[in-house]
Image (tube, helix red, strand yellow):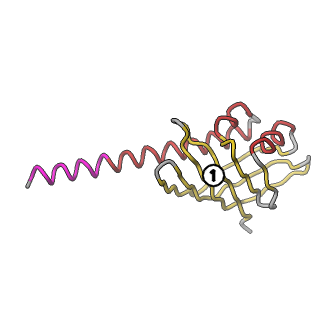
Amino acid sequence: MRYGFTLLLLHFFLFSFAQNSAHEKILQTELRRFAAMTQKDTVVLKQLLSDDLMYIHSNSLQENKSAHLGNIAAGTMVYQKMSRGKVQVRRYGKLALTNGDVQVQGLLKDAPFEVHLAYTAVYKKKKKTWQLVNWQSTRIP
């Protein structure tokens, strides 16, 4: 009886540790992506974005991976600062969702903007890397 309880506790601990570790990797991937966006690092972004990306901005602009990378590389969309606030992670096997808020400052076609966004991001695990599949954000008034 005591042995079974110990195994149960060990299983719970290991499961919790694995969940927390996976959640942390997803959150770190998201922060790496935000940093790459502000640094116009399209090499890193290519690795962090899924080939079938759908990126829906708060102004309803929709971009695939190529358009998103192209707009960042060309300077059409310049992300100067991205500060994530609260965030929640839910994981379903090789899929994960993050829901959070982010403060974004930048330039859109040389016009400055500053927005506070609520977002949902969908990530899928490809090999050992989490890639963004879908992003949708809404302005927080």
Is 137 displayed left or right of 77 in the figure? left
Going by the picture, which residue comes out furthest to the bottom? 141
Q: Disc 1 marks which residue?
A: 84
Displayed quadrant of residue 62: bottom right
Relative depth, front residue between 89 and 115? 89
- Predominant secondary structure, magenta span: helix
> What amino acid is at disc 1?
Arg
Residue 91 locus on image (x, y percent):
48, 54
Residue 6 locus on image (x, y percent):
16, 50
Please give the name of the residue rendered at 74% of the width and 64% of the height, measured from the top-left corner.
139
Please give the name of the residue rendered at 74% of the width and 34% of the height, measured from the top-left corner.
42
Please give the name of the residue rendered at 78% of the width and 41% of the height, measured from the top-left corner.
66
Please give the name of the residue rendered at 70% of the width and 48% of the height, measured from the top-left corner.
53
**Local secondary structure at mark 1:** strand
Highlighted magenta segment, given as a residue range: 2-14
In magenta segment, residue 83: no
- Quadrant for the N terminus, please: bottom left
- Quadrant for the C terminus, please: bottom right
Displayed quadrant of residue 77: top right
In magenta segment, residue 11: yes
Residue 122 locus on image (x, y percent):
60, 53
